[in-house]
Amino acid sequence: MAKSAKYEEGSGVAPQIETPWTIYIPRTLSEIKGETVLLKISGESLSGEGGFGLKREPIYDICSEINSVAESHRIAIVNGGGNWARGPDIEKNITLRKTPAADELGMLATVMNALVLEDVLERDFGRTARVMSARVSRIYENGQSGIWKRGES
């Protein structure tokens, strides 16, 4: 089970947090009230000790922490997909060559994890959340057409 972090006001040192995920906050939370906190969640942290798939307990614990911080801060989440697929493993063990499909499968894995986080945050914690892709803005900046997945428009 994850332990809660203790933040010392004015210390200027990022707290050491004993969790299966990594949180780095350069200042104390009260000093950045209302600002955006970036949270990187590894795919493996969503699978518990097994390292593959999804488990409710770690997902619920992570979403509980997110909900707590979201009371006073905007949250931006970047999540991984290593609990489902890793590009280098696919290239080494399946395609036996470098292929864009391996990277695409990894990106699909991140979407799957993001959808789970979105659902738990909204249904279990009442916190509005939306899955977005960083690729969307780059596509339009470059004048390319977008193909929307999941019925997005």
Image: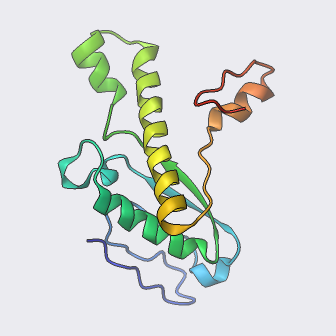
| Along the line of sight, the residue nearer the viewer: 21 or 130 | 130
Q: Position of residue 124 (x, y in %)?
A: 47, 65
Q: Is residue 36 left or right of residue 105?
A: right
User: Quarter of the image containing the N terminus?
Assistant: bottom left
Question: Which residue does the image show at 44% across and 70% down from the upper left?
Answer: 64
Left or right, 56 with respect to 81, comes to left
Instruction: State the colouring used for the structure image.
Output: rainbow
Along the horizontal axis of the image, is 96 left or right of 64? left
Answer above or below: position of 56 versus 108. Answer: below
Residue occupying the point 38% across, 75% down: 16
Q: Residue furthest left?
A: 50
Asked whether residue 53 is in view, the answer is: yes
Q: Position of residue 150 (x, y in %)?
A: 58, 31
Residue beneath the point at 32% across and 9% down: 97
Residue 20 appears anywhere in the view = no
Residue ranking furthest to the front? 123
Relative to residue 105, is residue 24 depicted above or below?
below
- Location of residue 105 (image quadrant): top left
Query: Up-down: is 13 above or below 61?
Result: below
x, y percentage for residue 137?
Answer: 73, 34
Number of numbered labels in the structure image = 0
Q: What is the quadrant of the C terminus in the image?
A: top right
Residue found 22% across the figure and 17% down from its top: 93
Q: Position of residue 132 (x, y in %)?
A: 62, 42
